[in-house]
Amino acid sequence: MDDSVETVSDAQLMARLAGGERAALALLVRRHQRQVFQLAYRTTGDHVLAEDIGQEAFLRVWRYAKRYESTAQFTTWLYRIVVNLCLDAFKRRRPITGDVHANGDVEPARQVGTIEAGERADAVQRAVAALPDRQRLAVVMHRFSGLAVRSIAEATGWSESAVESLLVRAYAALRRALQELEKK
Amino acid sequence: MACPQDNKILRLVGGELAGAEERDFRRHLAACPVCADALEALSSTWNDLGAWQIETRDADVVERVLGQAEAQEVATHTPTIMAVFTRGWLRIAASIALAAGLGIVTGTLVPPGRVAQDSASSAVSADDELINALGLDELATPSATRLPLAFEPVAAPNGEAES
């Protein structure tokens, strides 16, 4: 493969992957793993689970490459896989409250910048984690993955109005939760 | 948020409104305090959420994914022990069925009631053919009447042999 990684589109890589070129998979993983991991982590609150979800998502990309239709945007297709894996994970595991260690302690958000910023990040993580699953998934995709309402609807299979409703309720709940934390 | 323009506020904050649609909505915001308050609240929450940055760990799953893909590819092309076992038994069963079928067609296998008679005669017949083929028919004739006699019987005038 002599093309520059940047110039090859996702759809082209998928076509190569469907043709059996496994190197195309490596490029797709490198290009999207960060976004996939962040979506899975913010949604599940578990680093190990998020990595497992990311790994399984790309394996499914490889497995079902021949079914991919280039008319669909690759990222929407990929996010749909990740969303399904996250929804499956919700069914299997306990409610999330951030990273939960074996002893039951909750790992605070990884600190970035000052201590105050770290505390703020921790508060946001807890507030997001406290949302119902579907609201959390919608708000993570909207606020952190930067997906438009229509893209979220396509990735989740929910209607646009359902996504909007979830987002309105989620942001309202987050606002209340963050105001409560500020008062303390 | 009670204003029916909730969806527009979401899209504006999410950067989805543009052009004439954005202009029209901003005009509405200037005239609607409910929507203006809702926009301010959502913008504030949106900015607060930005505090949650995730450190990207060295979670490079490329090698793991490629390794798994290769392993699964090999697995799909390599029959499992169970598959080999099952396929082996199927072959044996098919062979037995084929042999039984051929046996019935050629008469080697017959219904139980005819076994003794037919197998005895066919065994004798097969023996005879073998003996004839080897040129031993004079030495190995099973019937006593066909043994070479030490003397020639003399035919009596009435046709009876003398003892």
Image (spheres, coloured by chain):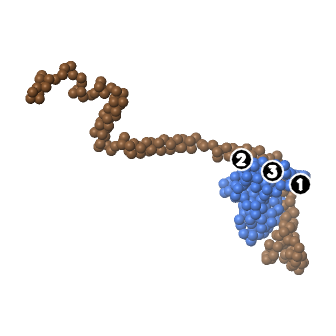
Chain colours: A blue, B brown
Q: Are marks 2 and 1 in contact (CB under 8 Å)?
A: no
Can you see residue A131? no
Chain letter of disc 1 in the image:
A
Q: How far across and down, in percent of the image, does residue B30 sit?
A: 90, 78
Query: How dense is the environment of label 2, judged by Cα within 10 Å: few (below 14), some, or many (20 and up)?
Result: some
Query: How dense is the environment of label 3, judged by Cα within 10 Å: few (below 14), some, or many (20 and up)?
Result: some
Quadrant of the image containing the N terminus of chain B: bottom right
Please identify the quarter of the rendering in which residue A89 is found.
bottom right
Q: What's under tag 3, amino acid-wise? A: Leu
Q: How far across and down, in percent of the image, does residue A145 sit?
A: 81, 60
Q: Earlier in the sequence, mark 3 or mark 1?
A: 3
- Please indicate whether residue B17 sits to the left or right of residue B133 in the image: right
Q: Which mark is residue A116?
A: 1
Q: How far across and down, in percent of the image, does residue B2 sit?
A: 79, 76
Helix, strand or loop at mark 3: helix
Q: CA distance from mark 2 to mark 3?
A: 14 Å
Q: Which residue is mark 3?
A: A27
Q: What's under tag 1, amino acid-wise? A: Glu
**Residue at x-position 75% and y-position 70%:** A160
